[in-house]
Image (cartoon, helix red, strand yellow):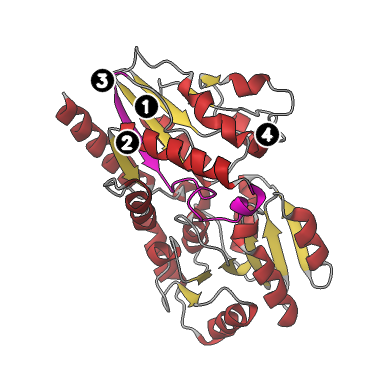
Amino acid sequence: MKVAIVHDDLVQWGGAERILRGICDIFPNAPIFTSLVDFSNDRLKQAFAGKKVISSFLQKIPVSKSLYKALLPLYPLSFEQFVFDEYDLVISQTTRFAKCIITKPKTTHISYCHTPPRFLWNYSNLAEVLQNRFLINKLRLVDQIYAQRVDQFLAGSINAQTRIKQAYNRQAPVIYPYVDLQRFNNIESFNGGYFLVIARLNRYKRVDLAIKACFELKLPLKIVGIGPELDRLSAMGQTGEVDFLGNIDDATLTLVLAGAEALIIPGIEDFGLTSLEAQALGKPVIAFKSGGALETVVEGQTGIFFHMQTVDSLKEAIKKLESAQINPERCQQNANKFNKESFTKNFKQIIASLVYTKK
């Protein structure tokens, strides 16, 4: 069976790219089709070394890598131009437009979706940037049309499953992403006395809540990640003990996680791999009670929820952590359920059944 993999873009390293790497391990000979590639990013270059990566016409636009969000209206077209006639199976992994491909009836298209596009379906604040409602409505229509052409959706979480049903009226079996547990072998946790946020610095991640809460509680905070909100958040962080670490390699990230008092997740996550990575090291999670956190955090056992996206609500959760009986071994047990072996087995089984059914 000849397989191709489609991914939104390869310009940043994050949870979606980790899962893409896992899908590539299942189908090692499958090329990756994507809108844009930026292998000046060392983590991307290393992760996909030796893989055949085919990019779209967007790659030829000189500023495409730095202004890729401004090119969002062109994304559906960039995926339409790919030809998959020679493939039996195409797997698109997406939070945006990678599903906007055209395949012939003989080719099975399975879309592993972690969320419909947030900016189209009101899951982020990017809609505030795209003030042109006409454009948003047009892109939403395009998104819905292509969603109906997908043979089968798979969801990365129950949260994603619900969104797919709401946006497209499509059913989607859940296959949870995996945690690379081998990264944490022989790593000893310690108490470095700081709290930690790991996130792309977008507005909907609500990193500002963590900065304000830690400032008011006089607690040290480390922030891993970059993004369009960096300057604004850096200015806020000057008033407190906030350390912006930027993008760091996996080995350094693991050590930073190992020393954290707790991981704070102030935004609504599609799933939340970082939550499980923290738990794999025996670290508790303080998360907003919504989205993927409901599937990765066991309240009172592996973490604490806060119920409103406000500074006061987050502060109360941080205070609760001091008296909570969080067992590091219970955290690790929870993370171990999301192992790569289970992901690979489940993915292979459902892919095989779907391809067989179509035949």
The Cα–Cα distance between marks 4 and 1, rounded to whole angstroms, is 23 Å
Residue 147 visible within the image = yes
- Which residue position is annotated with label 3? 105
The vertical placement of 347 against 38, above or below, is below
Task: Give the mark toward the camera: 2 or 3.
Answer: 2
Across and down, in percent, residue 311 comes to: 64, 78
Residue 284 visible within the image = no
Q: Secondary structure at mark 2?
A: helix
- Which residue position is annotated with label 2? 148
Residue at horizontal 30%, vertical 49%?
Answer: 174
User: Does 214 sit left or right of 168 as displayed?
Assistant: right
Q: Secondary structure at mark 4?
A: loop
Residue 87, image quadrant: top left
Residue at horizontal 46%, vertical 33%?
Answer: 98
The vertical placement of 93 against 330, above or below, is above
Q: Which amino acid type corresponds to the residue marked 1 in the rendered image? A: Phe
C-beta proximity under 8 Å, tags 2 and 3? no
Chain-order first, disc 3 or disc 4: 4
